[in-house]
Amino acid sequence: MISAKWRTLILLAIAELLGMSVWFSASAVVPALAREWALGDAGRAWLTMSVQIGFVAGALGSALLNLADRIPSPRLFTASALLAASATAAIPFVAQGLALALPFRFLTGVFLAGVYPVGMKIAATWTREDRGLAIGLLVGALTVGSASPHLVNALGGVSAWRPVLWIAAGMAAVGALIAAFFLSEGPFRMASPPFDWRYAGRLATDRPLLLANLGYLGHMWELYAMWTWLPAFLVASFARRGVDAHWAAAAAFVAIAAGGIGSFAAGRIADQLGRTRLCIGAMAISGACAVGAGFLFGGPPWAVTLLGVVWGVSVIADSAQFSASISELCEPQYTGTALTLQTSVGFLLTLVTIRLIPPLERLVGWEWAFASLAIGPGLGIWAMDALRRSADAARLAGGKG
């Protein structure tokens, strides 16, 4: 018999998977949109960057207003997922180019700020000693949800981009219904705190929180640029071997979705061995993949796919542990605000690397473009090692650091 806790966490993960499917829905069909709308590199990048900017705007507003701690989480999750689904569904109905598509993508990001960090807050209200595992399950679901448009793409959506967006919007709407009827906050929920817009600023001056957030920033420097441009890398690499783009889309789905399994497994490891150690190990592997990807460009598709899977697992394995660390280091009544602020700053940074990869690819080719992403893991390893060696590490993972 599944306990109420794990029943809720599993349903939360499913709702998160479905709700976040709209994030990369447009990015997954960039080749088709580029042909139909005559998009250059900037236009292609903005299809993802507009969502990131919207998420940052929504998350910053939510953090300053303490919305994630003052509004019942299932209600906020439901409304946000429904609005994100509506914004995504509107694009194939009304957009004939970027002029309308980008505002709807921006709104999608704004609304998703009420899905991802709020889902992590719900998970935190149900867990203590196994929080890393629970949030790992949630981030794993987000990973598979982010990869799902590439699966739709591989099954026939490469040239038919409208169905991909409609399916993603429908998935987000189903996620909202699950949240509305089946989700609730757990026994560790704190009473709603008084409104305090200054708390977001105080988070930047607390040393352990600052180190955890620096580790997260290093992680985010790499993550979304990899998720955004790995499919294009695979298409170009497979093309050198005469392999069809549908197979590249399938490889992109496998590589990114594999991170869902990695995130869940890493959560259990982090709860047992410590969050900082897990983060350091994961970033060492993902940074090595960022440097090594170019050496396999144009090589055997199986080898390129294998590297993509290793990278996909390691690049997301640490993500949940940064969030779990923040939830253990911050003031408990402001967990939602702290998580929302963390994600907003992290996603703001992703704008740099998402936009950086196309000009780097033109300048040095796919052989070296991804190597720049290894800078992030380098910073993250330093920050998490400093946190591991501090007295505050005793507050993480039940004293395991």
Image (tube, rainbow, N blue to C red):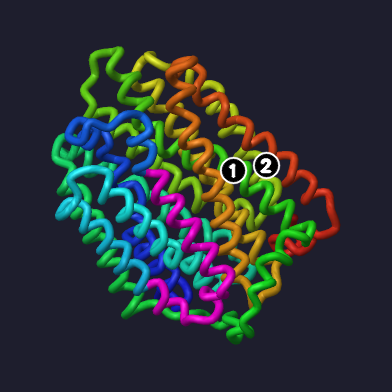
Of callouts 2 and 1, which one flags the residue occurring earlier in the amino acid sequence? 1
Q: Is 399 located above or below residue 294 in the figure?
A: below
Where disc 1 sits, the SS reads helix
Q: Which dot marks residue 69? A: none
Query: Would residue 349 appear left or right of 152 to someone viewing this image?
Result: right
Q: Which residue is painted at 22% across and 43% down in the image? A: 97
Q: Is residue 57 magenta?
A: yes
Q: Which residue is painted at 31% across and 67% down in the image? A: 83
Disc 1 target residue: 219
Amino acid at pointer 2: Gly
Q: Is the magenta stretch mostly helix, strand or loop?
A: helix
Label 2 with label 1: CB-CB less than 8 Å: yes
Quick one: 398 or 74, which is closer to the camera?
A: 74
Where disc 2 sits, the SS reads helix
Amino acid at pointer 1: His
Q: How many labels does the image show?
A: 2
The region drawn magenta spans 48-77
